[in-house]
Image (cartoon, rainbow, N blue to C red):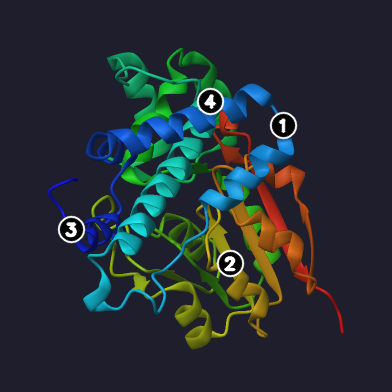
Amino acid sequence: MNDKTPEQQWQWLQSGPGLSALSEACPQDWLLVRDELAAVFARRNPAELKQLVERSSQRIKPDARFLSGERNGRAFADFVRAQIRQRMTELALRQYAFSAATGVYQGKVRFNFFNGFLAQKLLFKHDLVRKPVSMRAFKCIWPLLWQKRLLMPLVEKRGIYCFYSRELIAGLARIIGQRSCLEIAAGDGTLSRFLSDAGVDITASDDFSWGKVLQYPESVQRMDAAAAMARFNPQVVICSWPPSGNRFEKQIFRTRSVETYIVLGSHSRFITGNWADYEAQTAFAWQEDAALSKLVLPPELKAGVWVFQRKSA
């Protein structure tokens, strides 16, 4: 990275490099981040860890001090390096939490033929196109897979963070009913496709920021969450695996048309959701639907379904 100007480094950071790319490009910064994380984990202070998570998930843009002609000075260089270290911290925390959930911390991840064949038949319609999974079939077949902990590290690289059971889709459809529904951060639109097949009036939207990983179908509208809510004025909003510390969920609580917001995500606050915004908002009462949580697959993810209902005036 020493051969790049601060402006070039900033533009590269905006392209979303992964933790490996960041640590290889900025080894000294990675050593500082690694040492800080090791010290925090060693102290085992929940409050300190929570503060670190919240700080690492903040997105800061260059302010008026850094005009286009002022981005090669020392101040902007320091700003960029700080943002690189912050991004490293966020990705490292997410990787740690995900590894803890899946049990895979290092080494290559690969299914053998038997495990791969059963997983494919159980979870996918074809290739990596998911299907609603029968809980009955899942309970019979899943215990037979002795490599089950390898599943999520394999599919996560293709933008798949969980699987949806038929019973889960039916339960979500009952909550939504005949109301208009919008899925934000919909990815490849799998959840919206399943809900639509169940009779739900739903529109899928995504800002297409994961274009290098996903192939977006025509059924997914290209727009960010705020634009989608302003255009469709949904009564129900649903989001599956919202990024940790995201900036868009707060817009849901500010949208007057929204009566219900449904979140599918991880119990680990390192992996999904903006928990600070969940706890700060006062317009909605919310709680986990424990019955639906058990229907998000696989169970090793320790996933949850949280339902926010607007309070009556």
What residue do we see at 35% from left, 38% from top?
Answer: 29
Residue 63 in which image quadrant: bottom left
Three-letter residue code for mark 2: Glu
Residue 280 in which image quadrant: bottom right
| Of 47 and 102, the residue lying toward us | 47
Question: Which of label 4 and label 3 is nearer to you?
Answer: 3
| Cβ atoms under marks 3 and 2 closer than 8 Å | no
Badge 3 is on which residue? 5
Q: In the rendered view, does 267 fall on the left or right side of 21?
A: right
Question: Which of label 3 and label 2 is nearer to you?
Answer: 3
Badge 1 is on which residue? 45
Secondary structure, mark 2, is: helix
* Residue 141: numbered disc: none
Badge 4 is on which residue? 38
Q: CA distance from mark 3 to mark 2?
A: 34 Å
* Residue 249: numbered disc: 2
Q: Residues within 10 Å of mark 1 (few under 14, many from 20)?
A: few
What residue do we see at 47% from left, 21% from top?
Answer: 149
Relative image position of residue 302 (x, y in whole percent): 63, 34
Of the numbered discs 4 and 2, the one sitting upstream in the chain is 4
Three-letter residue code for mark 4: Ala
